[in-house]
Image (cartoon, grey):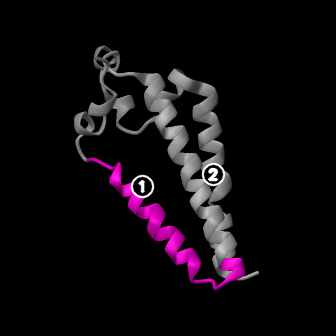
Amino acid sequence: MNIGVWCCICVIPGFVLVGVLFGIGKERAARFISGFNMLPNKEQELYDKAYMARDIRNSCFLWAGIMAIGALLSWLLTAYMAIGAYVVWGILFFRDVHVDAHKAFEKYLKK
């Protein structure tokens, strides 16, 4: 096996583990979301914690799938396919990163 396969395979268990923990923990797991746990309890009640946990769970499983595809393509074609997998993962990951906590969680506000 080449280095591209190992670079993709080594992160898959972490993504799956976090996805499973957010899937099992549901609303209680929302306290582990960076930035959300720093908000006051009164303000946390304004957000849909189940939706937040579900969104994190789905993102982690998507990232694990991207890395699995990257590992498979690295094994079948060339080790450089791992770079493509990391680029796709980076785009998806940094799309959801925000400096302001209120902006990051505005889509989870209860209506």
Q: Around disc 2, counting alpha carbons within 10 Å, would you say few (fewer than 14), some (14 to 19), or many (20 or more)? A: few
Residue 30 in the image: above or below residue 91:
above
Residue 79: quadrant of the picture:
bottom right
Q: Where's the N terminus, which quadrant?
A: bottom right
Q: Where's the C terminus, which quadrant?
A: top left
Picture coordinates of residue 35 (x, y %)?
35, 37
Q: Identify the magenta region.
A: 74-98
Query: Observer-nearest residue: 85 or 2?
Result: 85
- Whether residue 46 appears in magenta in the rendering, the answer is no
Picture coordinates of residue 86 (x, y %)?
50, 69
Judged by its main secondary structure, the magenta piece is: helix
Q: Which residue is mark 2?
A: 14
Picture coordinates of residue 99 (x, y %)?
25, 47
Q: Which residue is mark 1?
A: 93
Q: Residue at x 34, y 22 (%)?
A: 47
Residue 46: quadrant of the picture:
top left
Under mark 1, the amino acid is Phe
Q: Residue at x 51, y 32 (%)?
A: 54
Query: Looking at the image, which residue sits at the far right?
Result: 1
